[in-house]
Each structure stands twice: as structure tokens, then as C-alpha cells.
Image (cartoon, rainbow, N blue to C red):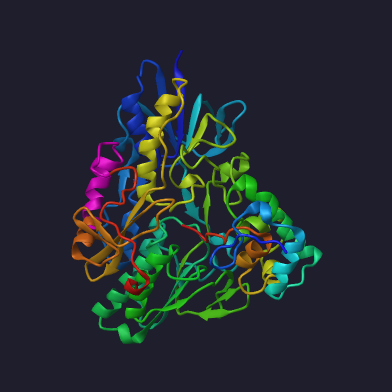
Amino acid sequence: MMRRLVILGGGTAGTVVANKLRRRLSLDDWRITVIDRDRDHLYQPGLLFVPFGGREDLLKRRRRLLRNGIQLLIGEVATVDPERKSVRLLDGDVVSYDYLVIATGTSSRPEQTPGMLGAEWRRSIHDFYTYDGAFALREALQGFSGGRLVVHVVEQPIKCPVAPLEFTFLAEAFFRRREMRDQVELVYVTPLDGAFTKPIASRYLGRLLDDRKIVVETDFMVERVDADRKVLVSYDEREVGYDLLVTVPLNMGADFVGASGLGDELNYVPVDKATLQSKAHPDIFAVGDANDLPTSKAGSVAHFSSDIFVANFCQYVEGLAMTHRFDGHANCFVETGDGKALLIDFNYDTEPLPGRFGPLSLLRETKANHWGKVAFRWIYWHLLVRGRWLPLPSRMSMSGKHRPKEEELP
Amino acid sequence: MTTVHVDAEGFMTEYGEWTEELAAELAARIGIELTDEHWKAIRFLREDYPTHGETATLRRVSTLAGIPIKQLFVLFPGKPAKKMAYVAGLPKPRGCV
């Protein structure tokens, strides 16, 4: 009797999981199906560089990234019926499963903030987390003659929480290079009480913003955008004006997750944080950004947690106890402009700390970190999503890290 | 007089040590007099925490308890997520990750 594994979403997590399981599960016993709504896989870390004229090698065919023997089905998921163990697509097709992996990620929802979508969308109001958005913003930056550039985050959690800071640093360097930095006022508007979510990293990143004369507006919960007056309005009635707004809209998981009763208030699937198993349905797992893990929504988390998930899944389908525990490990390069970057490495229990990570420096701007980020594109396409082995441990290590004393902090 | 455990910022750290009388006292310390509307939010936070495992965000309170975010800012002015957690005897919302 063939067993059916269905993976919803062929992005980073879905592709890694499919390719790794394809090697572990025999095709004599298993049918592995990936369902995605379109044919192209987007290299999302590359979007950050597009507004500044970055390379455009961003898309590859999903089919070419999936191993032979994996079935790829193109279609939009309407609902999942966890009782009948079936997935219904918008075109009416029904796909049955024995085990389901939800890997449909998270996406930007500009329509969730009143006033954001409208005549000014992609004119004076931009995003850079989508392919079209990043290219529209490139044109807007090229044509920007000076004024107030506001970088804004609607609400946490967001995919790649360091990206808006990176964008701000890169924009600052961009205007300096064009010899117009003195004509641009840069403002970073965040719902958090500091530059970043974790206290020690927030101090380091806050210092970098300070050094670059970037104003930070904290605790700003946006209620609406007044696109005519070009101001952001908060729930407590503060206003921040802009000439050019680069916003990170509210992020939400896929609509079918909500429609199927599988999600929380933001359509994320509640899972056990050590195993990624759905709390409600044991034969459903959610990997990558689609789940509610209390760690960053990031490619590195998708990668590390997939390693743990695959090892556990092979035990689970044999009726064994799952013995591998995910620790929330995340590892992110943070571009800071001028060909430099810093690196952060953390998990559920340990916030980003300074020190060394192999040959790279943690929480310190170096050229080596920048080249690490640049090299990652090749690693992503050729090793990571193919499910090949990478010399990066799934679990975080304290080796090289140290907890700074108060007087050492910036 | 009872003693309760709190962290460096005064957020209670033991779920079981909270009482409704204590909530009123904590609220008074940050200048809030609790009305039925406040209680609706606080009871939701208390009930949600044990199953959810995290202090509810403003969006979660607004979606699941049906109190608009704007109203939460009126009830708990300034920093409603933190103030609600403080009064409900729950950890400071991690604001995220």
C-alpha cells in the first residue's frame, strides 16, 4: 500500500523537506507530492538588493530544484480537511494524504492597513518583500530627488526581521554614494521599543543607526496611512510624515490555513516548538514561516528546523517516538552598507551575542560577513534547497560567544 | 500581606500567584481603574495564556476577544500590550523574535 506525503508550498522549507525526504523514503512505498500555485522559486534574500540595482538572478523553475521522483502539482489550495485527510484546490481537484506538511510561508498584506493600498501604492508607498515591489522601489529610489524617506514596519512578526534595518543601512550608503545624503532625512519607524527584537543586538544595531544619523521612532503601532497628506498615523494619534514611504506590511500565513481552521489569528499553524508537529492534528506538520514557532521567520530557521523535522518524520512514520528537538536556531547576516555586514546567531533561549562564529564575527561589521552573505546565493541554489549537506549545525552552539558586561555594550 | 514573584521590570513571573484583587492593585499602580471593559481584556489574557504559552499580542486580543486595537489604546494608554500583561500577571509580551 503506497503512503502519500503531500507538501503544500515549494519555497525554501517545502523544497528542502521534499528533497531530503525523497532520499530517505523509498519510492516503492511512498508518493511525494509538492503543491504550489506557480512554477518559479524566488530567491527571497536577493530582493533586498534589487532597489539598489542588485543582480537579478532571482528565479528558478521549481521543477528543476526538486529531485526526480517528486511530483509537482501547480494549483492554489482552497482548504484542507484534516478529518478526511484531503486537500481541495481552487479548481476543484482533491488530493488525499496520509501525512501533510504545510510550508506555505507568510506574505505581505498591505490591504490590512487602511490607506496603504490605493493610488499612491508603488508611487510614494512601497514595499520590497515582493518581486514587483522591489523593482518598483528601484525606480522610485533612482528618481528620488531628496526629502524624507521613512522605513516602516507595521507589526511583528515579519519575515526576515532584520531586512528593514538592512534596507535602511543600504539606503543611507546609497544616498551617500550619490552625494545627496545631506538632502535626505532618514527615519526608521517600528512598533518595537528599540531597533530590534532582542536587547543586546538592539543596542548594537541602535548604535549603527545613531552613527548614520537615522532617526528611530519607537513604539509606533500604525492605525492607518493618510496617503493624501503623506503621513503615518498611529493608534495613539502620533503622526510621522514622509515623502517616500518604504513599508513592511502586516505579514500573514496563507488564507487556506485560516479557512481550514488550522491557524491562529495571523493564519500561522500552532505547532510543538521542538518537533513542528501540529498541536491539533498529529499527521500534520508545519515547516518554515508557516508555523508559529517563537523564533525569527527566516531562511536559516527553515533550513535548521527542516533537518530536525526530517529526522523526526522518519521515526514518526515508523511508529517510533520523535527524539530530535529543534532549539529555535537562527543565523542571519545583516548588511550595513559599504560592503560590510554583521552576523547574528541565536535560538529560543539565547539572544544574539558578540564573539566569533567560525571565521566570521558576531555583531561586528566586517567585509568577510558581507562576502559570506554574497556567497550564500550560490550555497542556497546548489546545496541548501537541494537538501545537500551543509557544514552548519542545526543546533546553536555557545562556542565563540560571550555575554558582554553592561559597560561593554554600545 | 502576600509576597509575589516579579521580574526586574515588575512583571509577575508565577501564573498561579495572580488574583483579581492583585490585578486591581497593579492597575492602580499604573494609574488605571479597572472597568468591565478592562476586565474583558484581562480575563481573555488569563484564559489564553495557559493553552497558547505566550502572552497574547494586541492583534490576538483584538481578533479573539473582539476588542478593537484602538479601544485597547484607550483602556491601557501608551503601551497597551505591556500594561495588559502587567495587570494580568503575565510575562511581558516578547514583542517578537
**Which quadrant does the N terminus of chain B fall into?**
bottom right
The x and y percentages for residue A397 are 31, 48
Closer to the camera in the image, B34 or A158: B34
The x and y percentages for residue A181 are 31, 83
In the rendered image of this protein, does residue A359 appear above or below residue A215?
A: above
In the image, residue A343 lies in the stretch drawn in magenta? no
In the rendered image of this protein, does residue A216 appear above or below residue A118?
A: below
Closer to the camera in the image, A81 or A139: A81
Q: Is residue A379 visible?
A: yes
Which SS does the magenta portion mostly show?
helix
At a point 34% along the width and 39% down the height, the residue shown is A62
Q: Is residue B75 visible?
A: no
Closer to the camera in the image, A337 or A279: A279
Chain part drawn in magenta: A373-392
Closer to the camera in the image, A245 or A315: A315
Residue placed furthest toward the bottom:
A182
At a point 50% along the width and 74% down the height, the residue shown is A218
In the rendered image of this protein, does residue A36 appear above or below residue B38?
A: above
In the rendered image of this protein, does residue A327 appear above or below residue A228?
A: above
Is A82 left, or right, of A347 in this rendering?
A: right
The x and y percentages for residue A166 are 34, 66
The total number of labels drawn is 0
In the image, residue A378 lies in the stretch drawn in magenta? yes
Residue placed furthest toward the front:
B1
The x and y percentages for residue A216 are 44, 77
Residue placed furthest toward the right:
B36
At a point 44% along the width and 51% down the height, the residue shown is A348
